[in-house]
Image (cartoon, rainbow, N blue to C red):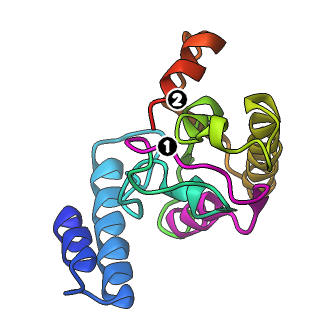
Amino acid sequence: PIFDAFQKHQRGELSDEALKDAQDRSIRELVIKEEALGLPIITDGEHRRRVFMQSLADSISGMPGGDSLRTRVPAAGRLKKIGNVALEEYRFTRSLTRRPIKSTLLSCDRAMQSFAWEKSQPVYADMDAYCADIVAIQKNIVAELADEGCDYISIDAPSYTADRKSTRLNSSHS
């Protein structure tokens, strides 16, 4: 059902407001199921995200989003935090349950895979500088979630086993 809503929205058959209503409904139904199963920690199932990296991409200006893992994108400017979508997701789920909630964030190294570092030297000297900005923004997002009471934060899709050379080789395939 939520997948259908995303497809209709992408085709222009569903308004932004109708998509949000579908997401709200889907998350409410999911929380009811999770509680009925006796799960000690509740999630929103990422039902607000069309793709798993969307909440980070929507929280940062200049951050490639959507299907950018298939195509590498050069930086047009320094990354800047413009919001905290994960916090918005957490607040909604918090309104539905008294159980602890887990929020999921995209790993920094995974976010770097969508960055065409070789085409970004005017903005970022190297991947380390880009990574430093992502880490600083993520630390702020995590701090805001913790301040709001989120006790469980999962880092999604870490790939720390890739060495620096293979990461650069992989990111050069634009």
Rendering coords of residue 88 (x, y %) = 60, 68
Magenta highlight on residue 45: no
Identify the element where label 1 is drawn: loop
Rendering coords of residue 52 (x, y %) = 42, 48
Rendering coords of residue 70 (x, y %) = 37, 42
- The span picked out in magenta is 69-93
Residue that appears at 49% across and 61% down? 97
Quarter residue 91 falls in: bottom right
Rendering coords of residue 98 (x, y %) = 54, 58
Front in this rendered view, residue 161 or 89: 161
Answer above or below: position of 158 versus 104: above
Which residue is the site of mark 2? 172
Amino acid type indicated by mark 1: Arg
In the rendered view of the protein, which quadrant contains the C terminus?
top left
Residue that appears at 54% across and 25% down? 158
Quarter residue 29 falls in: bottom left
Amino acid type indicated by mark 2: Ser
Front in this rendered view, residue 1 or 30: 1
Q: Is residue 23 left or right of residue 172?
A: left
